[in-house]
Image: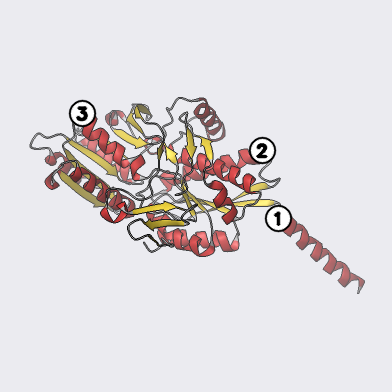
Amino acid sequence: MTLRITTALVGALAFASSAMAADDTIKIGVLHSLSGTMAISETTLKDTMMLLIEEQNAKGGILGKQLEAVVVDPASDWPLFAEKARELLTVEEVDVMFGCWTSVSRKSVLPVIEELNGLLFYPVQYEGEESSKNVFYTGAAPNQQAIPATDYYLEELGVEKFALLGTDYVYPRTTNNILESYLKGKGIADEDIFVNYTPFGHSDWSKIVADVVALGADGKKVGVISTINGDANIGFYKELAAAGISADDIPVVAFSVGEEELSGLDTTNLVGHLAAWNYFQSAESEANDAFIEAWKAKMGEERVTNDPMEATFIGFNMWVNAVEQAGTTDVDSVRSAMWGQEYPNLTGGTAVMGTNHHLSKPVLIGEITDDGQFDIISQTAEVPGDAWTDFLPESAVLTSDWKDLDCGMYNTATSTCVQTLSNY
């Protein structure tokens, strides 16, 4: 009998100790592809999260608790993102998730986190047309990247014909729909806009590049707006070089190519091509110098920084501040504390989280240099992110305000709200 009581007591104490340990840990889900076609971009964001968590733990954690990263690999498999998100929320019981790159992966996760009231910080530029109460969008909306880049082509480079090249999924298609409408509103004719989509991992770019070259046969200036994602960019830029196309001939402005993607390329023939982001490693500020120093000390001198890393950095630190302000990791309390959060960005300004769950961000345009970095040639002040574009009729009447309207998709014409966006 004594032995039984002792064994039971030991088991109870072990369970209590385990529960106490769990209570003393704040779990953070890291939901990024570490294999497959998107690993070239997403692995760096997993590494960024590990650095940020390590640094926060060195400061004492949050609310007296240490942070624990729970890393999963959705393997560039979009339905698997939903399964992994459910696992993180129901099995691992994470307090927050940082993850996704492509919009199709985010769309896969969206119904899961809305159902389970999870919280996702999404750190990559996207097509807009969304505002979920369960997501904070720390990457650029179209008015913070695609539209300003197009204006630069029109106003600074005199581009008259546009090749909109994208990977075949929701982000490029929606972004290009917005850009087509915008360009036509600027007087660009239908026949002067060439649109083409290719699958993830596409490698044979010879015909597409030839079609782009042919677009300028009449002597008009052609520019490429690229929403090509993942490792398909390697083949695209190699084909441009093989065809002898320079930035002076046909400039390319990319929305998904940054320092990380260029680190695997010979950039000799890419010099002068462009990218539009809200951050470049070459930005000059004390905050950026400190961030780069910490990153390279952890990951090695050869590792570069990029825009989605800065978006992750801002989102993570805003979340930390919101948790400390709320005094809890409870999703509803943290969400309310996030509205109006301010945090220094890495380009010398201040990011502010809007009640539409989008950040204010500066718009930067950079030219590729021969060392795989970017020479910043244009930079704006902070621009508030617009969840719904003004350039699609069905979206122009929509607004998002989770604080006062408690709605992410409010129709100003009918004064009605659609609460759930997962099927939109």
Contact between marks 3 and 2 (CB within 8 A): the answer is no
Asked whether, in this view, residue 311 is left or right of residue 129, the answer is right
Residue farthest bottom in this picture: 1
Q: Position of residue 249 (x, y in %)?
A: 18, 31
Residue 23 is labelled as 1
The tag earlier along the polypeptide, 2 or 1, is 1
Cα separation, mark 3 vs mark 2, equals 49 Å
| Neighbours of disc 1 within 10 Å: few (<14), some (14-19), many (20+) | few
Q: Secondary structure at mark 1?
A: helix
Q: Residue at x 59, y 45 (%)?
A: 322
- Amino acid on which the number 2 mark rests in the picture: Ala
Q: Position of residue 224 (x, y in %)?
A: 23, 39
Residue carrying label 2: 58
| Neighbours of disc 2 within 10 Å: few (<14), some (14-19), many (20+) | few
The residue nearer to you, when weighing 104 against 314, is: 314
| Neighbours of disc 3 within 10 Å: few (<14), some (14-19), many (20+) | few
Residue carrying label 3: 248
Q: Secondary structure at mark 2?
A: helix
Q: Secondary structure at mark 3?
A: loop
- Amino acid on which the number 3 mark rests in the picture: Asp
Q: Position of residue 289 (x, y in %)?
A: 51, 26
Answer above or below: position of 241 versus 92.
above
Cα separation, mark 2 vs mark 1, equals 19 Å
